[in-house]
Image (tube, rainbow, N blue to C red):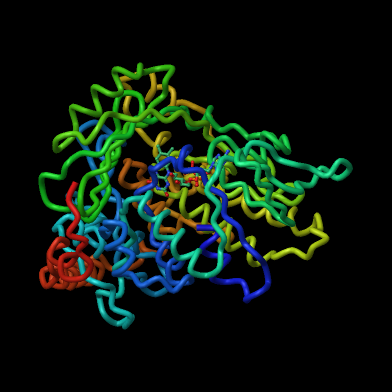
Amino acid sequence: MTAAALSSVLPENAARICLVESEQIGTIGVGEATIPDIINFNAMLGIPEAEFLKATNGTFKLGIQFVNWGRQGESYMHPFGQHGVDMNGIDFHQYWLKYRQDHPDSSIEDFSLSAIAAQGGKFAMPDPNPRSVLSQLRYAYHFDATAYARYLRGFAEQRGVRRIEGKVTHIGQHPETGFITHIDLESGESVDGDLFFDCTGFRGMLISQTLGVSFQDWSHWLPCDTAQAIACERTGEILPYTISTAKQAGWQWRIPTQHRTGNGHIYSSKLLSDDEAIDSLLQDLDGPALGSPRKIRFQTGHRTKLWEKNCVAIGLSGGFLEPLESTSLFLIQEGISKFISLYPTAAMPAVVSDEYNRQLVKKFEQVRDFIILHYKATERDDSEFWNYTRTMDIPDSLSARMELFQEAGRIFRYEDELFAKPNWIAVLLGQNIAPKSVDPIIGAVGAADITRSLQSMRSAMQGAVAKMQTHRAFLEHYAWSGETV
Ligand SMILES: Cc1cc2nc3c(=O)[nH]c(=O)nc-3n(C[C@H](O)[C@H](O)[C@H](O)COP(=O)(O)OP(=O)(O)OC[C@H]3O[C@@H](n4cnc5c(N)ncnc54)[C@H](O)[C@@H]3O)c2cc1C
């Protein structure tokens, strides 16, 4: 992603870019679910959507269904896009909270176009006309991450990036400044550079092993540390959403691509053995397994500096938050776009890297709070894992936000946070965090008016979804790869 974006965005001759990769080491190969911002990344590079979907066996994603998170036996949808329409400057969910007093069976999902389409297995492109109900649809993709990396490599090479296949064995530093001067490969070749992106994954070969930048560990808030990943044959329809199911000591994902289903179990190795995790994963597959489960160990947190001297850590080398809300590729995008907006002079001024670090760390913290919310806002008491997360101390920033919401349903988006009000609302309400009272301003609006407005919104959305194609039919017409496993 970094080489492709820089080769596409930087003016010709601004830089010579070299990409070193080792097929022997390979990529981590997971990272199949995304959020809508990936559309902007591909658009910035000028990648045609249908071509990209075919090349990566991609499908559309309208949100995530969370099963057994708030309580066992319950599920809710975290859809992309907004719920309903804000009216008279007041958030839609405030109207809905009042509406629910007279309609206790109502769910806020009934007012999300993405959620209604997801549940019906439907898809359509959003309408750019803001007056159309279809303008409320938001989507992202599921895809084969290895195929995406391959596609972007080809893209970068076409734009002048020199790719070198080989294993890095040594990293040279300036004896006085400690700046990285070159990398040595197993083949004997040496590659000089002014600036180095560490994209070596969890090993952090440059940022950690060479420059010794420390790690901010968040495992006390996010105790999962291991994943088992396996693909299986797809048997049913191609769902236009990810499924995340809470388990005894973690959770499992199910991600449908065109040719298969990606599955994984993320868990705390202190509370669940590998064998137990694998058994649970294999039992829940909805088709024959393709290969055996692959174990991945991880630590949650980030490098205290993502840009140190002349090295910028992008991807897993810079930090990792479990893929509960599919945010890792987004954090890579953020790293790239912040780097472009802070493109340094050869002197590599510290003020530039300090600003980069401040902004990136803030992004990690904001995403962290949203992910912790899923673990904290639970009533589950059926295992040591859930007892721990339900009762643990959480960051002040998150507890203040939860308390404000519980008072009268107020929620705000701070600075340029990734997750907006509808995202927080979906998870807070989905996991049974209920405000004690409705907003006093809404208290003054007549219940009959609110009912009329909401029911007309709902029927407009249901009408729009009824006219959509099934997700599969849309894909077959638009970007079918035809590949089988
Ligand atoms: C269990 C799990 C599930 C995930 N799910 C999602 C998801 O659904 N959505 C999402 O957005 N993200 C997800 N992620 C994160 C996502 O996988 C990564 O952010 C993404 O794949 C980028 O990885 P990377 O390039 O940093 O590292 P890697 O994929 O590990 O790539 C490292 C690269 O460095 C090269 N390399 C390393 N050492 C050397 C060396 N010595 N010499 C030469 N080359 C070297 C390798 O060859 C490779 O090309 C998930 C991560 C995990 C662990």
Residue at left offset 67%, top offset 34%:
209
Q: Nearer the viewer, residue 149 or 227?
A: 149
Above or below: residue 191 compared with residue 4: above
Task: Pinpoint residue 400: horizontal percent, then vertical percent.
Answer: 54, 44
In the image: residue 245, left or right of residue 330 = left
Corner quadrant of residue 346: bottom right
Task: Pinpoint residue 448: horizontal percent, then vertical percent.
Answer: 21, 68
Q: Nearer the viewer, residue 16 or 42?
A: 16
Above or below: residue 421 compared with residue 185: below
Residue at left offset 53%, top offset 27%:
220
In the image: residue 288, left or right of residue 265 = left
Corner quadrant of residue 52: bottom left
Q: Nearer the viewer, residue 418 or 327?
A: 327
Corner quadrant of residue 322: top left
- For the question of whether residue 181 can be seen, the reply is yes
Task: Pinpoint residue 186: horizontal percent, then vertical percent.
Answer: 61, 38
In the image: residue 13, left or right of residue 463 = right
Residue at left offset 39%, top offset 65%:
91
